[in-house]
Amino acid sequence: MGLKKFIFRKSTAIENNKEVYRKFLINLSENPNHEYLRKLTIEAGEQYYSSLQKNGQLSENDRFAINRDINAAAEHKTINITD
């Protein structure tokens, strides 16, 4: 596979992960006390943020960002997902 194709696939995967995470955050904002939905939202956040890392591993900053996003969703605040 060529480099351009690899980069395109990687960026497409990142965008898909971001969209899935965004939808989970929206659903969580509508159901902030739903514990299973919260768990799924955390997993979607972990998938998205780890896809941004070269090594595929979450950093402490990523975990902080996920918690921030989830708290904002639960409190019906504006959600700004970090790129």
Image: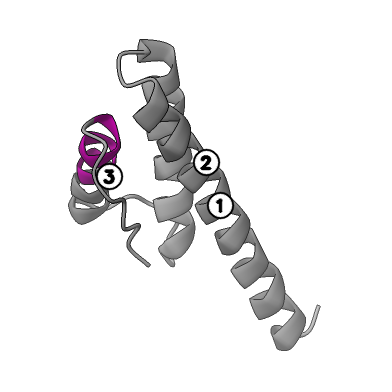
Residue 77 is inside the magenta segment: no
How far apart, in angstroms, are the residues tagged by discs 2 and 1?
A: 6 Å
For the stretch drawn in magenta, the main secondary structure is: helix
| 65 relative to 67, above or below | below
**Cβ–Cβ under 8 Å for marks 2 and 1:** yes
Is any part of residue 43 visible from this angle? Answer: no
Question: Considering the numbered disc 1 on the image, is that residue within a helix, a strand or a loop?
Answer: helix
Q: Does label 3 or label 2 sit earlier along the sequence?
A: 2
Label 3 environment density (alpha carbons within 10 Å; few <14, some 14–19, many ≥20): many
Q: Which residue is mark 1?
A: 19
Q: Which residue is mark 2?
A: 23
Three-letter amino acid code of the residue under disc 3: Asp
Q: Is residue 64 left or right of residue 23?
A: left
Question: Considering the numbered disc 3 on the image, is that residue within a helix, a strand or a loop?
Answer: helix
| 80 relative to 11, above or below | above
**Residue positioned 56% across, 44% down in the render:** 20
